[in-house]
Amino acid sequence: MAQVLEFKLPDLGEGLTEAEIVRWLVQVGDVVAIDQPVVEVETAKAMVEVPCPYGGVVTARFGEEGTELPVGAPLLTVAVGAPSPDSSGEDSEGSGNVLVGYGTSEAPARRRRVRPAAPNAGTNTGPSAAPNGAPRAGAPHAERVARPVGTAAGHGTEAPSAGEPVREDGPVPVISPLVRRLARENGLDLRELHGSGPDGLILRADVEYALRAAETRRTAQPTAPAPAPAPAQGPIRSSAPAAGIRVPLKGVRGAVADKLSRSRREIPDATCWVDADATELMRARTAMNAAGGPKISLLALLARICTAALARFPELNSTVDMEAREVVQLEQVHLGFAAQTERGLVVPVVRDAHARDAESLTAEFARLTEAARAGSLTPAELTGGTFTLNNYGVFGVDGSTPIINHPEAAMLGVGRIIPKPWVHEGELAVRQVVELALTFDHRVCDGGTAGGFLRYVADCVENPAVLLRTL
């Protein structure tokens, strides 16, 4: 007899609480193999193909494309052990720990069972419904979740009508801080909502639906004729929202906005900068590439200089633990670098950059850049950085004041390298000049340390032989 197993949206790592369904890779009725990708989702970090840990027949899907689901919400159900025309006898034990936060290595008895889907089951319209559309048995808010209060997928929530009881005590079923913030900024009491998520979980779609419903009720109410306006005493300022194209802050753009805002809010940063003569560095790179072997990128040479500087000034390879009131100096250098893609700015991370030579750094930068442009970076490749190198010179600009990539302590910005008049060996000459800017967290060090770091970087740029002391 077939057993129907429910596969939930797994924890994709690094505190991500939700993901948007971009594209379903399977249909109801399809036969899937263990670890076969079944859906493509977009988090605030990356696009991810989610593999299913079960093999069998897909009996239901939860959520349309474009729907945001919280971690732990059902994605689909699979009938395992059911005969099918092309069945290969998949084992219902599953595959093990495929992604962070979920796996199937535990005993089958611990897995949650759900009812099989009805023969004509198709794509469900909300994550709170069982495969046959019935409410979950034993759910604390089952009677509320099952109540049909909306027609749009994921919008099964509305503010209570007159006479309907309002939740006055007990925890509010919300796991997403984004949902709480959205409600708080719009003056919405979450206790008045009934979530459409599993066990009454309140989703972002529920809050947005409630806000739209409230706005509709306000505009529908008849209003008394407005009194005649008094004579104007000065310029009239309208409080109406500005007209124009509105672009939602979501996905990568939203994640960047949140992180940069948090950086400015929490980190007392300062910036110092210096011009450096990069002529000798460019000549050294030309000589390296002329010697044969893989080509060495300029970014790799700058990264090698950064790791050498961090070895001398470890205060800048750290993070601040305000709860413990401690600065935590980190042993490994996981170097982030800014990469512009069609989806927005992302910061891939080169692991253990301090242990790599210029050739290895060049190869890893190329691999991560290609993955960033293809949208295939994993959450692990986008998180965990300890220091960031930002080469904004590729955009044709000379300088900037970088914003620290929270929770790191510093970022080095590099402008374009261009010919400029420069005093070299006592004479005016045309040299290849670059502006270097260091933004640092003033809690981890003072200006002397930051200036020492930046001066060492500039010395290595001007005279690459300085690096030989650290090799």
Image (tube, helix red, strand yellow):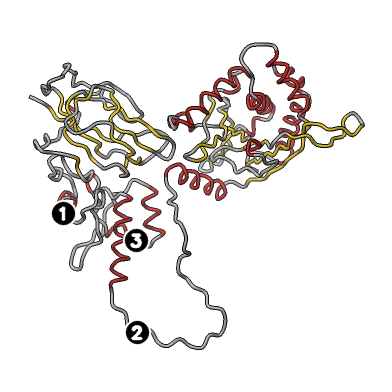
Q: Closer to the camera, 148 or 339?
A: 339
Residue farthest along the top direction in this orientation: 292
Tell which circle, 3 or 1, labels the residue nearer the N-terminal end: 1
The image shows residue 62 at horizontal and vertical percentages of 23, 40
Q: Which amino acid, by three-letter code, is at mark 2?
A: Pro
Disc 3 to disc 2, C-alpha distance: 29 Å
Instruction: Say which element carries label 1.
Output: loop
- The mark closer to the camera, 2 or 1, is 2
Tell which circle, 2 or 1, labels the residue nearer the N-terminal end: 1
Task: Say whether residue 206 is left or right of residue 467.
Answer: left
Instruction: Say which element carries label 3.
Output: loop
Q: Closer to the camera, 122 or 471?
A: 122
The C terminus lies in which quarter of the figure?
Answer: top right
- The mark closer to the camera, 3 or 2, is 2
Callout 3–callout 2 Cβ contact below 8 Å: no
The image quadrant of residue 290 is top right
Task: Say whether residue 260 is left or right of residue 216.
Answer: right
Q: Residue at x 64, y 40 (%)?
A: 440
Instruction: Say which element carries label 2.
Output: loop
Say which mark, if any, is on residue 225. Answer: 2
- The mark closer to the camera, 3 or 1, is 1
Callout 3–callout 1 Cβ contact below 8 Å: no
Q: Which residue is mark 3?
A: 188
Q: Rate crowding at label 1 as few (under 14), some (14 to 19) or many (20 or more) other CA atoms within 10 Å.
A: few
Residue farthest along the right direction in this orientation: 426
Q: Closer to the camera, 170 or 179?
A: 179
The N terminus lies in which quarter of the figure?
Answer: top left
The image shows residue 284 at horizontal and vertical percentages of 74, 20
Q: Which residue is mark 1?
A: 147
Tell which circle, 3 or 2, labels the residue nearer the N-terminal end: 3
Q: Residue at x 28, y 31 (%)?
A: 25
